Image: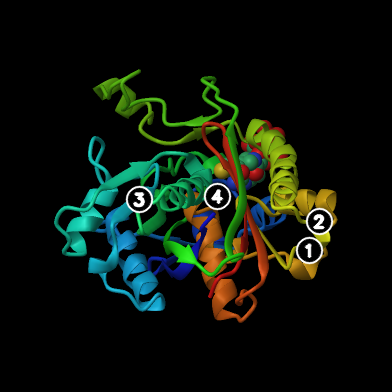
Amino acid sequence: MKSVGIKGLGYYVPERIMTNADYEKIVDTSDEWITSMTGIKERHRIAPEQATSDMCFEAAKKALAAAKLSAEDLDLIIVATVTPDHHAQGAACIVQKKLGLKTIPAFDISAGCSGLTYGLTLGDSLIKSGRFKRILLIAAESLTKITNYEDRGTCVLFGDGAAAVILEETEEGYGILSSYIGAEGEDDGILSIPAGGSRKPHTVESIQNNEQYIVMKGPDVYKFAVNICPAATKKAMELAGLKMTDLDLFIPHQANIRIIEAAVKRLRIPPEKVFINIQKYGNTSAATTGIAMGEAIEQGILTKGKIVAITAFGSGLTFGSVVMKWAY
Ligand code: COA
């Protein structure tokens, strides 16, 4: 069986930073509440003229450079996002054009914040099958464009960003060791945008009611997350044939510091093995674990041979955990 791994990673966050003090001017909130309830201090916000594919393009160029490859070396593009530039057109197709490519397949996957774990699982299988050789997988989200800035329960949480990886066959025993993905489907509006889809196309009324923005039942997501995050990580480690103590680095989805702390406590992972950057970026959905891997590489924490687990959960409700032996 082939080994498939990440051979280059790049990430991008927009320039503009929104601090908790900025939110104090928009909604009835406080730095104290946001910090203690979520761990977030700042997030990056995409410019009005930017869209998700613009961030994807920036991250993709960096990933290709890290892998010492050019766009022509790719044979598939996958973008994991719930905020494509346009409905009814994959952001991946726009990225293909931006990269100057002509015919390689390009499509999006929609798995909420679990998108990167779903994409890695898919990419791993497609390369192992022999159908594709080198895949550009990007997790990118412009959540601030679908955020209701009158809803203090959601607007303080989200930020924008993108992370891109190049997946290809790698040295035996390195790369993706296991993955465990799943979903607990719901249609109770736990985490979704009420209007603008086929269930409820936009009307003047839906726009007036702010139904074009994300709606979340925070406590329901919280309950799901604190259970699934440790359970999925444990399962993925078992599937990799590893003990929790074999883990060098745990990169959980950066949605809420309290969810991370609860998961880490349950998994008994020492704090020095846990990567946290939620304070700088907030929740960038599918991109959080990718941006965190990028920062861990920059900081010299994630190096060849290290065992790393990334675990995410999100709308759907979906979840996923991928265990890798870092390949470069
Ligand atoms: N500032 C101040 N108060 C706020 C607030 C804010 N930004 N947002 C919510 N509150 C208030 C609520 O209005 C409520 O007030 P009330 O008791 O007077 O009605 C109170 O805080 C508690 O609200 P609740 O939603 O029950 O809080 P919570 O303890 O569940 O915390 C979250 C809210 C959003 C931090 C928490 O639910 C959470 O993190 N959930 C998971 C979210 C997530 O991870 N989403 C992404 C999934 S990928």
Q: Do we see residue 316 in this rendering? A: yes
Marks 2, 4: nearer the viewer: 2
**Which one is closest to the eye, mark 3 or mark 4?**
3
Q: Any atom of ligand 1 within 8 Å of the CB at mark 4?
A: yes
Q: Is residue 57 left or right of residue 313?
A: left
**Mark 4 or mark 3, which is nearer the start of the sequence?**
3
Q: Which residue is mark 2?
A: 243
Contact, mark 2 vs mark 1 (Cβ under 8 Å): yes
In percent of the image, x 43 and y 63: which residue is there?
Answer: 168
**Residue located beneath label 3 in the image:** 78
Specify the quadrant of the image occupied by residue 173: bottom right
What is the number of the mark on residue 94? none
Q: CA distance from mark 3 to mark 1?
A: 31 Å
Between 114 and 326, the one nearer to me in the picture: 326
Q: CA distance from mark 2 to mark 4?
A: 33 Å
Q: Position of residue 144 (x, y in %)?
A: 41, 50
Q: Are marks 3 and 4 in contact (CB under 8 Å)?
A: no
Marks 2 and 4, the one that precedes in the sequence = 4
Disc number placed over residue 157 in the picture, else none: 4
Callout 1 crowding tier (Cα within 10 Å): few <14, some 14–19, many ≥20: few
Residue sitting at x 65%, y 51%: 256
- The numbered dot on residue 246 is 1
